Image (cartoon, grey):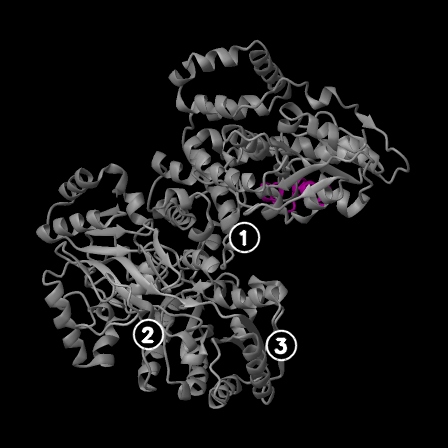
Amino acid sequence: MQSTYKMDFTEELKKCVKCGTCRAHCPLFVELKGEPGSPRGRLALIKRLHDGKIKPSQELADIVYTCLLCKTCTVNCPSGVISDEIILAARDSLNQSMDQSVIKKALLKGFLTRPALLHSCMSMASLYQKTGMHNVLTKSKLFELLPDKLNAVTKIMPDVTKKPARSRIPVVTPAKGEKKFKVAYFLGCATNHIYPDVPVAGVEVLSQNGCEVITVEGVKCCGMPHMAYGEVDTAKEMAKQNMDILLKEDYDAVISDCASCSSTFKETYLHIFDEGSKEYEQAKQLADKTWDISDFLVTKTGIKPGTKEQKVKVTYHDPCHLKRAQNIFKEPREVLKNTPGVEFVEMKDADRCCGSAGSFAVMHHDLSMKVLDKKIENAQKVDPDYLATSCPTCTMQLSYGLKKAGSQAKVVHPVQILAETYK
Amino acid sequence: MVAKEQLIKDLEGMFGVQKVLKSELERYTYTYDSSFVSQQTEYFPDVVVCLESTEEVSKLMKYAWDNEVPVTPRGAGSGQTGGSVAIKGGIVLDISGWNEIVEIDDINMQAVVRPGIVHASLNQALSPFNLFFPPDPGSSAMATVGGMVANNASGLRAVKYGATFQYILGLEVVQPNGDIIKTGGMKSKALKSVSGLDLTRIYCGSEGTLGIITEIRLKVLPKPQARGIMLALFDKLEDSALTVLDVFKAGIIPSGIEILDDGGIRCANMYKPELNIPEVEAAIFFEINGTKAGVESEGEQVKAIAEKRARSVEWATDADRMAKLWQGRAVIGAASARTVPGKTRIFAGEDVCFPISKVPEALRTIKNISKKYDIPVVIYGHIGDGNMHTAPIMDPLIPDEVQRTHKVAEEIHRLALELGGSTTGEHGVGFARTSYMEEEHGKALDVMWAIKQAIDPKGIMNPGKIWKLGRE
């Protein structure tokens, strides 16, 4: 079994002793129940494929793709099996031997790799919403005639009527007060286009806390969505360009407001290039320089909040790619607790996956909604004004869940609340 | 027996296609549990059915009875003996999704559950009532209570609280012919009953060979007020065992007494680096629970006893530290796979139980067996009741290592019998230990077989478990 994602399948799969601990932790298994829906079941089948006892098939791909990559099984595995990475590598391997549905190919290859096209599509979506066509089509129930997955997209799709962050933030934002750091701000696809208020707030907060912020131009998607769908070769190309651009100048740090982007830079790039290659060395450098914005504020700059109190009750949802991939969970809470007027409340199972997992919410809509319902139920129990999180796909999912449940609570990034104190 | 295609068609007709798993890939995920034997040979079921009601299970069994199709019940598949693997094909009945808590009666201190409820989830639900279900398997996070009853499981607190059978007031069981019976106090709320033969005891530990357990009435206990954990480190393995005997002699029964040998300590540290336990020959965890004053007093006494032989003793009552220490011990079973890079642990010869007076000798002999075959063996387990778990660390892809590991397991099983112990303290027989049954039980095995034949004359219930295939 071959994969571009660096993986010694024989050694890694051997570690699984089939104890079944993963059944206790997987948020999908609770919904799916039978053994094929457990991480242990998926790994057993990947091993069987690796041993050459079965061939790639649609059924196998369905099982391997029915995974949130939330890392919950990985961090809880007593034997140290890195299930999520094995799944990523297996997807890449399957991708090399199988056709994928048109929607995945179209979404990933011709979409996120080309920023100009992405922006025009987002603009079209914006126009589509501005003209009210979305409401007209929804009311006419025409969406019900669309294929299931397109229907799911329309359900979760947020309001993309705002200008992208790129057009709202200067390339160079000077530090307010004494300059302590010169940092590169990586504008990820989702926050740039769908939640542009997040990077706008992020740059403001960094600037207020002594950073000269460069919103580096020419960067591509981090590549995580491509890797999740086994498009590792495409991801490698984007990684190369991102590394060239982000390492060109000697920034003190590369900052991201998106848990997936920062975890991809810190961890995943190291798995797609050969050790000893130029790109691997670059990946190591980028991994060392990359910071989640909350982590950077708490650990490096310290937080000097503004004076305008917010008087809001806030709870926090841990994105999988921040807590389990980067062990960052105290820092976003620190940002919130250091924001004047914020009453922070912890919700039950704050680190349980919301079911979003990039496009999982579209591809496995019903299953994703079952996972989401549990999250929203827990959030509503603490009755927050804001449900804060540090990942745009979590934001999309949680916003949809709250709206569906009739809640007035809004989903924001912690830095958005902090930024308000400076106004 | 009915042809496979017809079997699948019939079951889909009876229960709907959603509840029937028939593809090769789906069926493959039911060919294993944690046992090494199940991972050495693939035993495919013809079909898997996932059911969640007594009526459905009864309907399934009537069909299986009429058509003489083997049925293998399965919970989480976390067993270590191949007990839930269909070695004669037929139907695997997956009841792990049937996880309802039917009733918690806090006044009468009992609970009624369906077999798929996971042990940890049950205790989580009992906690607000200040109650708990005492048997505490290391696999608490995934093991189902149905599986615990079927295997008469126990675990880390058996030294004080005993095994599952002591907490089963009654059972609802679907017989091999589909009839539904209720044993013991299933229909009453009496905490004691000696009315008639104790059928509950017969089903508890029967490993799915006599019927399908579909409902369980459990006795539960009030949660102790306080708890403390002591970690004592010993330079000599034997000193740890002698200390345990001294604690009993002093008239103290801790709620748990657990051992980790040097390999076990290493893997506990690898799994939870914050534990940072020095690598001595043996670490003993004493858990003491009861009233606050009782815990303090017993803790002081155990500490004084341990200090006579131990290199160091740590007494923790801080909730965080206790949780880490206890969890570090609980997951050693699977965590021992981390001990040697490139190798893994396997479950074989893993559950021997010795008379507690023989534990020091047994521990040293196991170390010698490990050396003899050059297969590292991690030792951990419930030293308080003599139930030792042994984890051979090996590479299953190297045939010679596989052969040597089988010999290690064989010698460890033999050692248990020679020292007057048992080949299995809590995991059961499955098909991994059938070859020792004759020697361990003699003529009593014939009586067991007579009971099996009286209840399951067609031999359709989990064939090849406890007794070897072909006994009929």
Residue B416 position (above or below residue B95): below
Residue A178 position (above or below residue B125): above
Please state the chain letter of the residue tagged with numbered disc 2 in the rendered image: B
Q: Is residue A166 left or right of residue B246?
A: right
Q: Which residue is mark 2?
A: B424
Residue B85 in view: no
Q: Say few, some or many: other residues with alpha carbon within 10 Å of mark 2 (under 14 / 14 to 19 / 20 or more).
A: many
Tell me whether the residue at label 2 lies in contact with that at label 1, contact meaning CB atoms closer than 8 angstroms.
Answer: no
- What's the amino acid at mark 2? Thr
Q: Is residue B43 left or right of residue B334?
A: left
Q: Residue furthest top?
A: A131
For the C terminus of chain B, which image quadrant?
A: bottom left
> How many angstroms separate mark 1 from mark 3 (CA)?
28 Å
Q: Which residue is mark 1?
A: A75
List x then y, in percent, for residue B336: 49, 66
Name which residue lies at 67% across and 35% down: A413
Please state the chain letter of the residue tagged with numbered disc 1 in the rendered image: A
- What's the amino acid at mark 3? Glu
Q: Is residue A60 left or right of residue A194?
A: left
Question: Does the magenta portion include A276?
Answer: yes
Secondary element at tag 2: loop
Numbered tag placed on residue B314 in the rendering: 3
